[in-house]
Amino acid sequence: LILAAEVAPLAKTGEVAEVIAPLAKALKTLGHDVRIAMPRYSHISPERFPLELLIETFAVPLDRCHVLATVYQMDLDGLPIYLIDNPGYFGQLSAPCYLDEAEPFIFYARAALEMLKRPELAWHPEVLHCHDWQTAIIPNWLATLYKDDPFFAQTATVLTIHRLSHQGIFGYRVLEVAGIAEHGFIHHAGLSDLAELVDLLGRGIYYADAITTVSERYAQEIQTPEFGEKLDPILQERSRRLYGVLNGIDVESFNPATDEQIPAPYDAATLERRSLNKAALQNAMGLAQDADVPLIGMVSRLNDLKGFDLLTAILEPLMQNLHLQFAILGVGDPKYHEQLSELHKRFPKRIGVRFTFNETLERQIYAGSDMFLVPSAVEPCGLRHMIAMRYGSVPIVRTTGGLADTVENYNPRVRSGSGFSFEPYDSLALYTAIVRAVEIYHHRDIWRLLQERCMARDFSWGSSAAKYVDIYREALRHRLEEKKS
């Protein structure tokens, strides 16, 4: 059973939602019985989705009393999805981005465990795969409240960290709601429990049979003070059960040869057709129609973590010294809305900005940009640069997390590599990487080679799903060994 606060297309606010269903599909392809449980937010209605009532009502222990839950189910491309509902928690909320309180997710997670024991389900998962802080209480429960429950005696827990900075830190009251106040704080260096706060993600890391994160590089980084968000001591202690597994992308949906949302579908053998998509993108963003100018695309949240402090510092010098264009799509901090708006006014035909998220325009940026820029300070995995590579847009990235694992810096001496990268987090390093990319862009034979290399990369979920299966088996082995001892 995969448990997550959001699953696309039912609910989506970030990359977590984008990976759950493709991972589940890949696991199913490998022969496993995979199901998903998530909250039923109010917008997930029978009018919009094919919901069926599975369990009308049942009691969920919560905060020394019982709260009623209802479970709906639906099929998503052959995957059973269980949607756990309580109008008091989810009735007035349309998406999980508004849920920054612990209690709704504690209810959802506890209801998911109680649901599994219901006769209506008649199903017994061997692994509970939890994602992020919203479900991280589950490993804690299986080691405490459900420790002697025979139903879960041979059930392992795996916790995936998508972004360590999102920890779910609350007051002591959260332990009372979760029914584990008697077990008290965890006195371990690095856990916020020591500061009279409860760190739900930290507790999940402490108790899970296996911990994963979304790239090999990020699994190494979070064990250091620089990236560890104060949890590096416990992550170092649990390093033997910590694995980095690169996220994949949905290669069926993101396929330039069949994508109906781009003006001119193409493949690696027909890259010349990308010029039609470039012209369409320039038109959509209000840029000058110029087939020869390097066009850099970005689809991102506009904040410091995504490197916009570096970019805004050099955009004007780039405009003054290089002949290039930018197409930027996203929303974020007001200061970057203001700065980018001002730069657009100064260079209206060279800097195009849309403060929104629009799937069609996003895909047009992948298909029409020559380069795709991700200058992040921290990037656990990153999906968009991998999608862009599949569409033949050459990446310019900072060497961190999944960006380092997926983009090999171009070496002009031996013509190796698939993109352009920089390591120091400063504007000059970013500026230099862009200059390098623009210079190589004008060598059309080399550029075509880079595009073909990008498009040849296999970012499907197949190999990553196989790694997860191995981790599930290791988690089960640890679980059974601990039960015996």
Image (tube, rainbow, N blue to C red):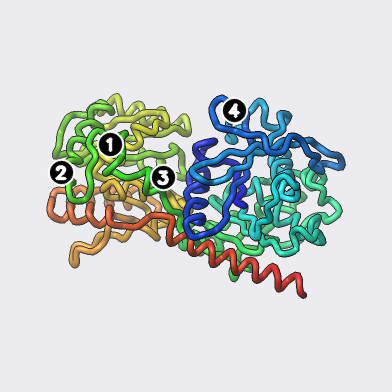
N-terminal label among 3 and 1: 3
Front of the two marks 3 and 1: 1
Residue at 34% in and 35% down = 328
Looking at the rendered image, the quarter that the C terminus falls into is: bottom right
Q: Which type of secondary structure does the marked residue at label 1 adopt?
A: strand
Q: Are marks 4 and 3 in contact (CB under 8 Å)?
A: no
Binning the other alpha carbons within 10 Å of mark 3 as few (below 14), some (14 to 19) or many (20 upward) gives: many
Q: Is residue 250 left or right of residue 94?
A: left
Amino acid beneath label 4: Ser
Cα separation, mark 2 vs mark 3, equals 31 Å
Instruction: Find numbered disc 3 in the image and state the secondary structure of the residue it sits on.
Output: loop
Q: Residue at x 23, y 52 (%)?
A: 451
Residue hosting label 3: 307
Q: Mark 1, residues whose alpha carbon is within 10 Å: few (<14), some, or many (≥20)?
A: many
> Mark 4 and mark 2 in contact (Cβ < 8 Å)?
no
Instruction: Classify mark 4: residues with Cα within 10 Å, few (<14), some (14-19) or many (20+).
Output: few
Q: Give the percent coordinates (x, y) of residue 171.
A: 76, 44
Circle nearer the N terminus (4, 1): 4
CA–CA distance between discs 2 and 4? 44 Å
Q: Position of residue 397 (x, y in %)?
A: 35, 51
State which tag comes first along the sequence, 2 or 3. 2
The residue lying at 57 percent from left, 49 percent from top is 165
Q: Say which residue label 4 marks.
A: 45
On screen, residue 98 above or below 322: above
Q: Marks 4/1: CA distance?
A: 39 Å
Element under label 2?
A: helix
Q: Is residue 199 visible?
A: no
The residue type indicated by label 3 comes to Gly
Check disc 2 and give the amino acid type.
Answer: Glu
Q: Is residue 439 above or below residue 485?
A: above
Q: CA distance from mark 4 to mark 3?
A: 38 Å
Q: Which residue is mark 1?
A: 326
